[in-house]
Image (spheres, rainbow, N blue to C red):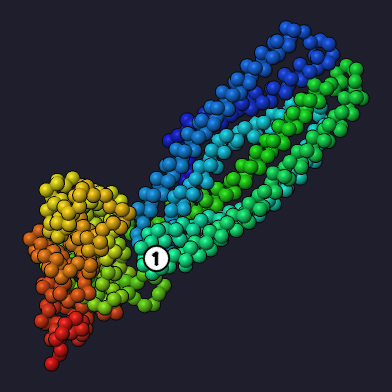
Amino acid sequence: MKKWLKYVKPHALYFVLGPLCMIIEVIGDVLMPYFLSILINAGMDGTLTVGKSIGLAGLMILTALIMMAGGVGGSYFGSKASVNFAADLRSDIFSKVQKFSFANIDKFSTGSLVTRLTNDVTQIQNMVNMLLRMFLRSPGMLIGALIMAITIRPSLTVVFAVVIPLMALSVFFIIRTGFSRFAKVQERIDHLNSTVQENITNVRVVKSFVREDFEREKFGNANNSLKNTAMSAMRVMIFMSPVMTIFMNLATVAVLWFGGQIVLGEAGMIGGMQIGDLSAFLTYVSQILMSLMMITHMLMMSSRALASAKRISEVLDEKSDINDDNAAYKDKVIEKGEIEFKNVGFRYYKNSEDQVLEDINLKIEAGSTVGIIGSTGCGKTSLVSLIPRLYDADEGEVLIDGINVKDYSIFNLREGVGMVLQKNVLFSGSIEENLRWGMENATKEELQKAASYAQAHGFVMGFTEGYDTELGQGGVNISGGQKQRLCIARALLKKPKILILDDSTSAVDTATEKEIRSSFKNELKGSTKIIIAQRISSVIESDTIVVMNDGKITGIGKHQELLENCEEYKEIYYSQTDKKEE
């Protein structure tokens, strides 16, 4: 409850006013049949006068207007409360996801997180809105109508003693069966969202391999799975309304039967039951059973919302395995950029025996350029991911300027590290807006300078709108090489003390790549530069080259030294050149 009350407190006024307005409507609902019974009884026994009829009519009209005001107010404040509740909850979930490490994100699929942020929150919002409108209204009407019915004829209320337990038992079994099925519906929505996202994001690959039919079939399977699961859940719930209607009609027939006999038997008796009383009693029967139907509807919605609440709680309760709660130097910033790996070991799956990185010992001097080369899957990306704490080492420690990376605040650590990932990511918006991720307040001159160093200024100015050119999602309307150069420019704008390029020039021709490497020497003289590459030409001029194989460092040195002393490096070198080993 503490978790959810957090989202109630800021909007407590709406949460109070909504139910209070609904109580006003309930009072009117309960009084109206009573006023009508007086009018009918007076008309039947000949005591109705013009003045009395006008007075009762005026009272009923006034009551109806007050009820309308209460109903409108209840709906308005209920909507305000539920929408604000959902907005705050959605904001917290999004903020929580932003704090997740890569390991946390790996635990949830992207489609699942999207569903939880949208559909699941909407289910909670609908439930809150329903509760505010019905939570007091339904019980209030039930209690009020029951009291009035007992006042009219206590013996007739025996009907409720029979009907209500049977209704409750039926509802219990229906909701119990439906709850687990709604949880499965949300899981199917996750799968559908993941399928759609994957297809749309990679639509160019789908078309290039002519896999549209396969993707249509894949989507159809996910869509049908959701449809069938949803129908399975709704198949249970559709019994709710007919069952409730049967009980309501049976109760009405019973009251008419027994009540009609009482009216006929007591006709003309002083204090006997009159037609107006029977009419009012029937209305109260209807109100009692309608209130029970509303409670049942609330429970039905709650069963689905509770499944969503559980899924949302999984995200909110997930603890990021990377945080700076115990950081010893939270105010410390990276000053020089010296990096050292001491006996580092790392695995993605903590229960796995095989390590991705094993016994890594490496020291990188501040301001130097280091190239890392090795076969695909040898651990190059995993190694550099430990520097900005995208993952944490399982063994040993990673130091920057002699301080363990875990002792920096995450903000200061990542602020001092610029990283151009293997998968280049650009966002919807203009080229300028994307570059400003590196430095939000950069001037036009600084933007163009960074783009020039990254060899991007030329092709940007070739666009009609230059830096105001709008990029599609993921930068789909520019080439791979252009994306890489824009990502490099974005990182250069940041002016980091440590720059990591993870195979980020693979789509750039060798001449352009050489110009980019040359610009690093001028623009980032004091920064430590780590270049991961597949091509020897990308790292050959580095101060130090690190060779990796199967999660281990097999060679460290300059180009000539490695040619003489490292078999793996020689194999890579000769496989990429026409020269043959003597």
Q: Position of residue 52 (x, y in %)?
A: 74, 9
Secondary element type, mark 1 = helix
101 over 278 or under it: above or below: below
- Given residues 470 and 188, the one toward you in this image is 470
Furthest residue to the bottom?
Answer: 582
Count every numbered label the image shows and give the total.
1
Give the quarter of the image for residue 65. Answer: top right
Residue at the image point whose x is 50% and y is 54% from the top: 311
Residue at the image point whose x is 27% and y is 66% from the top: 422
Tell me the residue that label 1 is attached to: 206
Residue at the image point whose x is 15% and y is 55% from the top: 457
Give the quarter of the image for residue 492. Answer: bottom left
Residue 403 at least partly seen: no
Residue at the image point whose x is 62% and y is 44% from the top: 299
Q: Position of residue 435 (x, y in %)?
A: 21, 52
- Given residues 278 and 159, the one toward you in this image is 278
